[in-house]
Amino acid sequence: MTQLLAGKTALITGASKGIGKAIAEKFAEHGAKVAFTYLSSVEKGQALEKALSDKGTTAKGYRSDASIYAEAEELVKNVLDDFGSIDILVNNAGITKDGLLMRMSEEQWDSVIQINLKSVFNLTKAVMKPMMKQRNGSIINLTSIVGIRGNAGQANYAASKAGIIGFTKSVALELGSRNIRSNAIAPGFIETEMTHDLANKDEWTKGIPLKRGGAPEEVADCAVFLGSEMSRYITGQVLQVDGGMLT
């Protein structure tokens, strides 16, 4: 297999499970050195570091809260000290706290915006200078089709993911002259721990032209493409990995 990310160092937030874990594993398969974060899932984070290292990948997990500005700065400093560079940033950390807006608490709103959207600002801000100095970099932000079309009961989540799209496009405009690309991936219905217990899963898949949910690995394949030189002339874009759900 051609290793599309050989020689590159990637930093992935929220990689202990789900889509983040799949991206870390797929990046390792393609030859990248992998730095990643976890927060509450300590055992899963440590297990991922061991699994990647056992396969010969240079990998290290960091317990860090991406939603806190100072921790994001410290994380990037530590990754640069340990790996020497950051060529790819994947902003993946995110949560849901669903509920109809009428019943949504201020805490439900604030925590989702803080973790999903502010973390993208924090990490992107922290990697900008080193990427500008090396005049190269790929920033990949995980948004959602919910950020494009909205979803009842997810006003907070949809707002955070829509904000990521606007942020992604703005960063592309600001940093393009330094050969730093900024793109987003908008997954549709992906079969992860987050979606495993949804009661209306069958209803979701009926509305998907490919008639199935996606796998985390299929989102990870898209991330490999955006992190590699194959996408060197692509920036400011939102790639939908949704089986045709939004067409």
Image (spheres, helix red, strand yellow):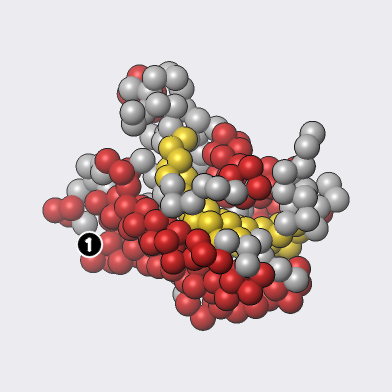
Label 1 secondary element: loop
Left or right: residue 211 versus residue 104 is right
Q: Nearer the viewer, residue 67 or 170?
A: 170
Q: Nearer the viewer, residue 140 or 108?
A: 140
Left or right: residue 209 versus residue 226 is left
Sort mark 1 into few (<14), some (14-19) or many (20+) by Cα contacts within 10 Å. few
In this view, the residue farthest toward the front is 177
- Residue 57, given in percent of the width and then of the height, sits at 81, 52
Amino acid at dot 1: Ser
Rendered residue at 54%/71% (across/down): 128
Is residue 105 visible in the rendered image? The answer is yes
Q: Work out which quarter of the rendered image holds the N terminus and state it.
A: top right
Left or right: residue 173 versus residue 221 is left
- Residue 108, given in percent of the width and then of the height, sits at 29, 61
Q: Which residue is mark 1?
A: 105
Q: Nearer the viewer, residue 99 or 54?
A: 54
Rendered residue at 37%/53% (across/down): 165
Left or right: residue 114 versus residue 228 is left
Total label count? 1
Q: Work out which quarter of the rendered image holds the C terminus and state it.
A: top left
